[in-house]
C-alpha cells in the first residue's frame, strides 16, 4: 500500500456499523481507552458483520507492555512492531496487517479515542473469487462506492466521476429551474460518468461477462453522481414543484388529526404503523434515488403481518394503500411532490425497464397515494364552511355525507324535541346539522330553567324537608367526587355538567373533553350559531382540556366567518394552547391564508397588539411553519407585517433553513434587501454576502450563519483539541521550544527577554536590539487559552511543571492567568500544590487572584497548607491573601495546617494574622 493512503474513516461502513449498531461495545471501548482497528474500504469481502467481527478488531493493551502487546476481545494475542500488526493463530502462519494511519476522534463530551486504519482485516472471512460480485443488490451509497472501488481495483474511477461532476458545476453555476432542462442536463452528465466508468478495463470486462454486474455498475455510477450532486439539484426541483407541494401540504395539514380507523385500516396492522412511520419519515435524509426507494420498500415491508408460523403474509394493494396514505399524512415531510418528482425523473439507470421492476412499482404506489390525497377524496369540498363534518373520514361516509346530512336535518326538524332527551351530545348534533333556531330555543329555555332554580335555591336550603332518597344519593355521589364542595375547577365543572345539567345544558356546559357549544360551532364553521351563542353570553375565551379556545379551532379549520365574529366579540388573539400555539400558529400551519389575513388585519385596524413573532413550545414562529410548508402567500404576508426570519427555534434553525424552495428564500430575503447580494442557487443553504456591519439585523444573521452553516466548526474544534494535546505533552516533557512551535510562537524572540528579564536597559532611551526585545510585545495567532477536555490550558501545565520561562511567554501572548479547569483550579492552584515559587510570584505579579477558589472551596493557600509547601506559603502570604476564607469543609488554611501539623506554615499564617 502507498504510504500516503488516506480515507475518511467516519464513512467507513465497518466503523459506521460499529458505532450505530453496536453502541454498547463502542462506548465501552471508548471508556476503557481500547484501540479500534478499522479495515480500509475495499478490503472486506462482506457487508454483513457479526459481533465477533468487531470484537476481533478491538485491541486491549497488556499491563506489562502496553505499547507493543495487545489482545483482541476474541482472546487472540497481537503484537505491534514498525506499524505492522501480527496476530498469533493456532494453526498456520501468523496473520499480519499494516497500519495505514492512526486517527484520534473525540466524542460529544470531547473524550478522545484512537482508531487505526489497517490494510487487511484481522481474522478475515473466506475470500471470494475475483470475478464474483460481493453483493447481488446494492442498498446504500457505501455499497456503490465499494463496488466501484473493489471492481475497478482502486479509487481512480471514483476520482474521475467526482472531477466530472465538479466540471459540470463550474459550467453550470446556476441550475435551470424547469424540470425538463434540469433533467436533460443531469442525464447528459450521467452519460459522461458512465463512459468514464467503462473506460476502466476491469469494469468493462466484468460488465460484459455478467449482466447483473453491468446493471449494478450503472446503478452505482448513478448513485455516486446523485450523492455528489444532490444539494445542487434538489432545491431547484423543490422550486419547480413549489405550487404542488404547498397545495398538498395544505391538504395534509388539515388532515393531521386523522386516525387509523378513519381509513378503514385493518386492526391487525395497527401495531406496525409506528415503525413504518419512523422508517418512511427518514426518506428526506437520503441523497440517492436508490436509498429513497429502499426506504419506501422498508416502510411497506414493516406493514406486512406475520402468521402463527412467523412467516410473512403479503398483503393486497387494497390493504396496503390506506396504510401508506396514513403514513404520508403523518410523516411530517414538507416536500412529498418534490420527492416523487426526483424519484420519477432522475432514475436514469431504470430507463427501459418499464413498470416491471420493483422500484417502478414502489414509485407508482407513492404516486397513487399522493394523487389520492390531492384529489380531495379524504378532505371533502374545498370550502370548509360548506360541508357537514364527519368524524369518520372514510370514503363511503364522505360519499354519503350529503344524504346523511339531509336525513339528520329532516329527522330533527320533524321530531318533537320536547319528547327527546335534550342532552349536550344531542345539542352538539344539532350544531353539526346547522339547526341554529332549535339550538337557540333549547339554550334559552334551559337558561330560564336554571335561573328559576337559582331563585328557589335559598328556599330549598332553608327547608329541612328532605327530597327524594334518589336525588340525595345522586347529589351526594356527585359532590363526593369533587375536589371540595365549592370547587370550580375544570374537572369539577365537567362532572357537574354531565350530571346536574344533563337534562338542561346551557351555553357554559362542557362535555368530557371540555368542549362547549361554541367550541363545536367553531370546529364545524357554523357562523350563524356562533353569532347566536355569543349573543347569549357564552364565554368566548373558554378553553378545553388541551387549552384550545373557540378561536383556535376556527383558525385551525379555516373558518374565516366564525373567526371574524369571535375577534369582533373580544376573543384573545394571543391566547396559547397546551403546545403554546396561538391562533396565528394554527392558521399558518394549516395554510389558511384568509384566516391569517383576518388575524393580521384585525389586529392592525383595531390597534390590538398581536405578537407576530411569538414562539410555540418547539420555538417555532408562524414564519417557521409557513416557510417549512411552502406557503408563499402566507410567508409574504407575515414578512410584510414584521415577521423576523432570523429568529431561531429550539433546534437552532431559522426560517431560512426551513425553506426548501428558492421562491420562499426569495421572499424571506425581501424583508432585508441589503442582507444578501444574492441567493446562490447551487447550494443547499443561503449564502451570506456583502453584509453591512452597521445593520443590526445583518450582523445578527451573519453571526447566525457562521454558527449554523459553517461545516468546519466541529472539525476545527477537534483539530484544536489535537493541537492542545500535543502542546500539553510537550510541556510535560519540559520541551518549551516544541510547545512554542505548536502554538506558532517564535521562541527565539523571547530568549533575550527570559535570559535578561531582571536586567536593566543600557540607558532610559536606549534602542539597541537587546533593549528593544525586552519591551517588544510578541503575539501568536494561536489562542493560548484553548483548553483540553478537562479544562487544562498550556499555562496550567507550565505552572504545574514549574516552567516559569514558558509561563512568561504565555502571559505575553495574552494567557488568562485566572482561567480555571473543570475542577475550578487556576494555574496558581497548581503552582501552589507543586511548590513552584518562581511561577507563583510571576502569576501574582501578572494579576492572578490570590484568593481564587476551586470547586471544593480551596484557595492556593489552602493547597500549600495541605501539602506543606513552605516556600509557596511564604510567597502567597506576601501578597496579602484572605486567611479567613473557609473551604467546603468549613476549614481555613490555618485549620488545615494545624490538622496536618505543618508547624512552619502555622507560624507563618499566625504571624501574618497578628500583623493585620
Image (tube, rainbow, N blue to C red):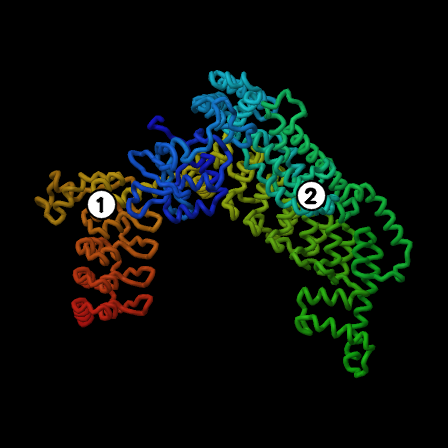
Residue pointed to by mark 1: 733
- Rendered location of residue 809, percent (x, y): 21, 45
- Rendered location of residue 394, percent (x, y): 77, 43
Dot 1 or dot 2: first in sequence order is 2
Q: Which of 338 and 776 lies nearest the eye of the viewer?
A: 338
- Which residue is farthest bottom? 464
Task: Name the residue at 46% across, 33% down.
Answer: 125
Q: Residues within 10 Å of mark 1 (few under 14, many from 20)?
A: few
- Rendered location of residue 250, percent (x, y): 67, 40
Q: Quadrant of the rendered structure where residue 778 is?
A: top left
Residue pointed to by mark 2: 307
Left or right, residue 808 beside residue 53: left
Left or right, residue 678 beside residue 468: left
Q: Which of 13 and 48 lies nearest the eye of the viewer?
A: 48
Task: Inspect this view and state whether residue 803 appears.
Answer: yes
Real-space Cα separation, disc 1 to disc 2, in angstroms: 68 Å
Amino acid at each position: 500500500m502507498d504510504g500516503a493512503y488516506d480515507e475518511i474513516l467516519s464513512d467507513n461502513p465497518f466503523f459506521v456499523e460499529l458505532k450505530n449498531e453496536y453502541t454498547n461495545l463502542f462506548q465501552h471501548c471508548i471508556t476503557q481507552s481500547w484501540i479500534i482497528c478499522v479495515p480500509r474500504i475495499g478490503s472486506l469481502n462482506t457487508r454483513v458483520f457479526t459481533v465477533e467481527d468487531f470484537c476481533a478488531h478491538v485491541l486491549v493493551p497488556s499491563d506489562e507492555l502496553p505499547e507493543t502487546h495487545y489482545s483482541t476481545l476474541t482472546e487472540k494475542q497481537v503484537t505491534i512492531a514498525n506499524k505492522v500488526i501480527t496476530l498469533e493463530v493456532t494453526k498456520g502462519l501468523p496473520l499480519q496487517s499494516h497500519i495505514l494511519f492512526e486517527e484520534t476522534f473525540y466524542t460529544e463530551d470531547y473524550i478522545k479515542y484512537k482508531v487505526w486504519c489497517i490494510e487487511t482485516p484481522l481474522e478475515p472471512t473466506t475470500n471470494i473469487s475475483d470475478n464474483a460480485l460481493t453483493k447481488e443488490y446494492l442498498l446504500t451509497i457505501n455499497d456503490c462506492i465499494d463496488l466501484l472501488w473493489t471492481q475497478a481495483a482502486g479509487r481512480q474511477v471514483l476520482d474521475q466521476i467526482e472531477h466530472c461532476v465538479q466540471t459540470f458545476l463550474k459550467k453550470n453555476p446556476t441550475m435551470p429551474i424547469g424540470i425538463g432542462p434540469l433533467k436533460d442536463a443531469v442525464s447528459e452528465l450521467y452519460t459522461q460518468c458512465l463512459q468514464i466508468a467503462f473506460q476502466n478495463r476491469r469494469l468493462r470486462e466484468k460488465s460484459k461477462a455478467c449482466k447483473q454486474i453491468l446493471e449494478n455498475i450503472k446503478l452505482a455510477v448513478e448513485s455516486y453522481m446523485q450523492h455528489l450532486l444532490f444539494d445542487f439539484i434538489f432545491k431547484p426541483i423543490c422550486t419547480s414543484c413549489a405550487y404542488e407541494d404547498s397545495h398538498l401540504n395544505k391538504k395534509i395539514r388539515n388532515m393531521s388529526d386523522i386516525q387509523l380507523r378513519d381509513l378503514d385500516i385493518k386492526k391487525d396492522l395497527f401495531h406496525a404503523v409506528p415503525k413504518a412511520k419512523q422508517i418512511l419519515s427518514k426518506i428526506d435524509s437520503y441523497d440517492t434515488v436508490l436509498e429513497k426507494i429502499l426506504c419506501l420498500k422498508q416502510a411497506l415491508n414493516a406493514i406486512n403481518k406475520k402468521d402463527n408460523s412467523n412467516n410473512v403474509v403479503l398483503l393486497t394493494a387494497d390493504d396496503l394503500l390506506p396504510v401508506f396514505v396514513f403514513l404520508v399524512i403523518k410523516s411530517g415531510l414538507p416536500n412529498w411532490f418534490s420527492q416523487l418528482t426526483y424519484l420519477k425523473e432522475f432514475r436514469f439507470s431504470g430507463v427501459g425497464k418499464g413498470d416491471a421492476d420493483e422500484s417502478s412499482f414502489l414509485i407508482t404506489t407513492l404516486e397513487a397515494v399522493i394523487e389520492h390525497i390531492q384529489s380531495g377524496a379524504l378532505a371533502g369540498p374545498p370550502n370548509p364552511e360548506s360541508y357537514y363534518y364527519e368524524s369518520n373520514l372514510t370514503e363511503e361516509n364522505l360519499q354519503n355525507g350529503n344524504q346523511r346530512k339531509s336525513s339528520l336535518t329532516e329527522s330533527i326538524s320533524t321530531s318533537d324535541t320536547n319528547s327527546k332527551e335534550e342532552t349536550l351530545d344531542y345539542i352538539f348534533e344539532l350544531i353539526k346539522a346547522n339547526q341554529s333556531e332549535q339550538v337557540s330555543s333549547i339554550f334559552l329555555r334551559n337558561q330560564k330553567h336554571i335561573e328559576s332554580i337559582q331563585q328557589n335555591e335559598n328556599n330549598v336550603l332553608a327547608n329541612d324537608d328532605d327530597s327524594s332518597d334518589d336525588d340525595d344519593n345522586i347529589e351526594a355521589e356527585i359532590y363526593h367526587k369533587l375536589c371540595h364542595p365549592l370547587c370550580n375547577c375544570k374537572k369539577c365543572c365537567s362532572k357537574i355538567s354531565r350530571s346536574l345539567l344533563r337534562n338542561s345544558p346551557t351555553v357554559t356546559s362542557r362535555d368530557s373533553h371540555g368542549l362547549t357549544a361554541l367550541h363545536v360551532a367553531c370546529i364545524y364553521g357554523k357562523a350563524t350559531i356562533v353569532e347566536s351563542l355569543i349573543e347569549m353570553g357564552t364565554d368566548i375565551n373558554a378553553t378545553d382540556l388541551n387549552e384550545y379556545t373557540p378561536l383556535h379551532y376556527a383558525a385551525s379549520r379555516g373558518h374565516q366567518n366564525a373567526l371574524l365574529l369571535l375577534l369582533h366579540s373580544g376573543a384573545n388573539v394571543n391566547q396559547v394552547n397546551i403546545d403554546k400555539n396561538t391562533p396565528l400558529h394554527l392558521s399558518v400551519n394549516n395554510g389558511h391564508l384568509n384566516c391569517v389575513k383576518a388575524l393580521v388585519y384585525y389586529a392592525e385596524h383595531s390597534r390590538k397588539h398581536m405578537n407576530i413573532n411569538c414562539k410555540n413550545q418547539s420555538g417555532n414562529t408562524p414564519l417557521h411553519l409557513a416557510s417549512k410548508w411552502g406557503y408563499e402567500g402566507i410567508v409574504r404576508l407575515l414578512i410584510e407585517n414584521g415577521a423576523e426570519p432570523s429568529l431561531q427555534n429550539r433546534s437552532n434553525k431559522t426560517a431560512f433553513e426551513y425553506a426548501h424552495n428558492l421562491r420562499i428564500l426569495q421572499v424571506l430575503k425581501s424583508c432585508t434587501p441589503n442582507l444578501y447580494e444574492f441567493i446562490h442557487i447551487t447550494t443547499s443553504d443561503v449564502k451570506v454576502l456583502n453584509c453591512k456591519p452597521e445593520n443590526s439585523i445583518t450582523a445578527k444573521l451573519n453571526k447566525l450563519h457562521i454558527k449554523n452553516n459553517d461545516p468546519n466548526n466541529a472539525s476545527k474544534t477537534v483539530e484544536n483539541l489535537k493541537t492542545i494535546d500535543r502542546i500539553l505533552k510537550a510541556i510535560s516533557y519540559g520541551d518549551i521550544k516544541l510547545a512554542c512551535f505548536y502554538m506558532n510562537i517564535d521562541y527565539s524572540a523571547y530568549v533575550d527577554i527570559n535570559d535578561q528579564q531582571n536586567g536593566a536597559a543600557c540607558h532610559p532611551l536606549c534602542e539597541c536590539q537587546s533593549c528593544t526585545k525586552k519591551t517588544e510585545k510578541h503575539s501568536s495567532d494561536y489562542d493560548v487559552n484553548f483548553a483540553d477536555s478537562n479544562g487544562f490550558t498550556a499555562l496550567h501545565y507550565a505552572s504545574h511543571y514549574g516552567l516559569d520561562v514558558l509561563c512568561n511567554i504565555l502571559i505575553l501572548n495574552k494567557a488568562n492567568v485566572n482561567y480555571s479547569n473543570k475542577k475550578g483550579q487556576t494555574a496558581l492552584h497548581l503552582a501552589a500544590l507543586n511548590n513552584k515559587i518562581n511561577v507563583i510570584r510571576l502569576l501574582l505579579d501578572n494579576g492572578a487572584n490570590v484568593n481564587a477558589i476551586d470547586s471544593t472551596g480551596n484557595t492556593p493557600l489552602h493547597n500549600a497548607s495541605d501539602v506543606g509547601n513552605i516556600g509557596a506559603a511564604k510567597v502567597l502570604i506576601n501578597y496579602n491573601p484572605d486567611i479567613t476564607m473557609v473551604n467546603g469543609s468549613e476549614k481555613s488554611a490555618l485549620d488545615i495546617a494545624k490538622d496536618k501539623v505543618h508547624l512552619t506554615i502555622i507560624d507563618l499564617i499566625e504571624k501574618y494574622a497578628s500583623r493585620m
